[in-house]
Image: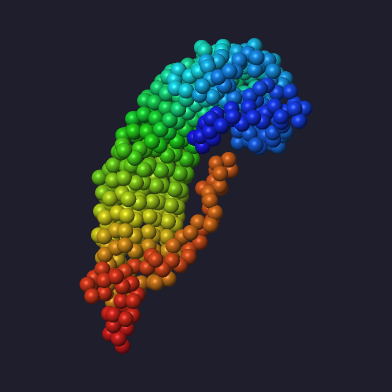
């Protein structure tokens, strides 16, 4: 959305000159009746903002107008072609205050898409009157930016609209009256509107809603009553707000919710049972770069179908058993922040299907002997960029399917040889550690420690079936840059472990 906004701001600044110079000649040549300061021409649906939501190829009659200082808005609407199907109104910075009313739009009954973008600072200079869209029975898409609403009945009578985007429109309190009659809506994006409070039953008039974005607002509290009735909701984006806690009264039953986005909220504690009604959710991100989250036991109970969990700023002295209780379907877990130690059986509860576990940059110092108990399906374990000085020879012994173990950028100087006995290990990152090179490393596998995993294709898009959505292809390729190097003894510092073994430590001569 940000990129789109940038493009249109540029258009606002440049279109007036272009249109004044070219529009009259172009439209006379094409034989199209079009108001001064507008462009009226056919456009494929795939070339408009509607393309993202409507998967079909269609030729639309599109009109784009720029409101300028001399524009008389009533006269402009009187001259817009009656057959217009996609209408874009851009307000230039020097344009006067203008109000779009029901009577203006009612003469354009074939409209399928509308994009209105005002200008200036709040209060904005483009206004929408009450029931402005009521006569547009073919309208499916509305995008509004920097527009003032004259009351809570702007959208009354809209039974056909499927997509509604509102940004920078200064909606401090989201009332249920605003969306009360949008019964066909599939997607709502209410982004950067300064929303601080959601009234009870705010979305009760949109029972078929599947995607809802409330990101980049000022929402501080979330009560279940605000989201009641969204029984078909699949995606809920609450990122970049001011939520500081999630509790058992935050979410109502949302049986079809697949993706919950809570990142960039200053959430400090996740209380037990707060996700108890979200048993269909399979992707969750939460946390804030400047505000850490403290994990407690049973915080994630109820998320029995969750596949992906990412928390970027954890603050725990130790991870304990039952902190991930109930995550029976989890395959991807990514934690960052401050986790000093991993206790015994820390991931029990999320162990049944976990395939990828990342504790990158967690300031990790200690790993208990039985920390990874039960992770029999784990294929990737990332413990890089921590403060590990030593690892028990038993820490990884039950990880029969582990293919990738990432230990680079720690403070290790010795490593148990048992690590190399993992039956399916393909890549072991050991670079950027303080290795004390000895002949005990003669059993290290150069092939394994110089290979890295490369992703060959991107994860599938969200629209795909959830069973395939986290899948991607990868391969293990040789990269000499990750070869582990000696830090001790001083005379061979900087040499690779394998150079030291072959040419400096005389390991093979000693065995003769």
Give the image location of residue 322, x and y in percent.
34, 42
Q: Residue at x 34, y 60 (%)?
A: 408
User: Is 157 on the left-hand or right-hand side of 291?
Assistant: right
Q: Residue at x 47, y 16 (%)?
A: 175
Q: Residue at x 32, y 81 (%)?
A: 503
Question: Toward the viewer: 452 or 510?
Answer: 452
Residue 479, by quadrant, is bottom left
Give the image location of residue 6, x and y in percent.
51, 34
Q: Is residue 365 above or below residue 17?
A: below
- Quarter of the C terminus within the rendering: bottom left
Q: Residue at x 41, y 43 (%)?
A: 310
Which residue is at the far front?
Answer: 21
Number of numbered labels in the structure image:
0
Which residue is at the far bottom?
Answer: 512
Which residue is at the far left?
Answer: 490
Question: Is residue 398 in view?
Answer: no
Q: Is residue 92 above or below residue 463?
A: above
Give the image location of residue 427, x and y in percent.
42, 64
Residue 8, by quadrant, is top right
Question: Is residue 158 in view?
Answer: yes
User: Is 476 on the left-hand or right-hand side of 506?
Assistant: right
Question: Toward the viewer: 452 or 170?
Answer: 170
Question: Toward the viewer: 1 or 452?
Answer: 1
User: Is 5 on the left-hand or right-hand side of 58?
Assistant: left
């Amino acid at each position: 959305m940000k990129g789109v906004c940038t493009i249109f701001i540029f258009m606002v600044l440049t279109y007036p000159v272009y249109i004044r110079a070219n529009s009259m000649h172009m439209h006379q040549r094409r034989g199209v009746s079009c108001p001064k300061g507008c462009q009226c021409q056919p456009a494929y649906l795939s070339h408009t903002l509607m393309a993202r939501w409507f998967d079909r190829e269609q030729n639309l009659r599109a009109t784009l107008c720029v409101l300028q200082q001399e524009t008389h808005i009533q006269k402009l609407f009187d001259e817009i072609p009656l057959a217009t199907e996609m209408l874009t109104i851009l307000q230039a910075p020097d344009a006067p205050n203008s109000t779009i009313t029901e009577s203006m739009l009612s003469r354009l009954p074939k409209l399928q898409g509308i994009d209105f973008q005002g200008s200036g600072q709040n209060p904005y200079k483009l206004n929408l009157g009450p029931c402005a869209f009521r006569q547009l029975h073919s309208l499916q898409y509305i995008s509004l930016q920097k527009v003032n609403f004259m009351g809570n009945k702007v959208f009354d009578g809209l039974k056909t609209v499927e997509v509604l985007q509102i940004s920078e429109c200064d909606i401090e309190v989201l009332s249920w009256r605003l969306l009360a009659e949008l019964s066909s809506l599939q997607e709502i994006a209410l982004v950067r509107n300064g929303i601080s409070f959601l009234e009870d039953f705010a979305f009760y008039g949109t029972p078929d809603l599947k995607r809802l974005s409330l990101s980049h607002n000022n929402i501080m509290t979330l009560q279940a009553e605000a989201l009641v009735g969204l029984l078909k909701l699949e995606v809920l984006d609450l990122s970049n707000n001011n939520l500081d806690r999630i509790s058992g009264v935050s979410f109502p039953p949302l049986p079809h919710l697949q993706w919950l986005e809570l990142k960039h909220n200053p959430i400090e504690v996740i209380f037990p049972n707060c996700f108890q009604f979200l048993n269909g959710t399979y992707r969750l991100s939460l946390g804030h770069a400047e505000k850490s989250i403290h994990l407690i036991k049973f915080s994630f109970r109820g998320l029995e179908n969750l596949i992906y969990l990412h928390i970027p700023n954890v603050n725990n002295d130790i991870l304990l058993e039952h902190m991930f209780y109930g995550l029976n379907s989890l395959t991807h877990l990514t934690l960052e922040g401050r986790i000093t130690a991993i206790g015994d059986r820390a991931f029990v509860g999320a162990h049944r299907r976990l395939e990828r576990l990342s504790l990158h940059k967690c300031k990790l110092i200690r790993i208990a002997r039985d920390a990874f108990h039960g992770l029999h399906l784990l294929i990737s374990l990332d413990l890089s960029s921590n403060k590990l000085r030593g690892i028990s020879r038993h820490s990884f012994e039950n990880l029969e399917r582990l293919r990738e173990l990432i230990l680079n950028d720690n403070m290790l100087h010795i490593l148990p040889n048992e690590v190399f006995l993992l039956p399916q290990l393909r890549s072991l990152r050991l670079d950027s550690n303080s290795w004390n090179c000895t002949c005990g490393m003669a059993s290290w596998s150069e092939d394994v420690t110089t290979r890295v995993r490369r992703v060959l294709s991107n994860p599938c898009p969200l629209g795909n079936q959830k069973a395939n959505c986290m899948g991607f292809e990868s391969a293990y390729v040789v990269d000499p840059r990750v070869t582990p190097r000696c830090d001790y003894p001083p005379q061979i510092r900087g040499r690779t472990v394998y150079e030291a073994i072959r040419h400096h430590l005389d390991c093979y001569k000693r065995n003769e």
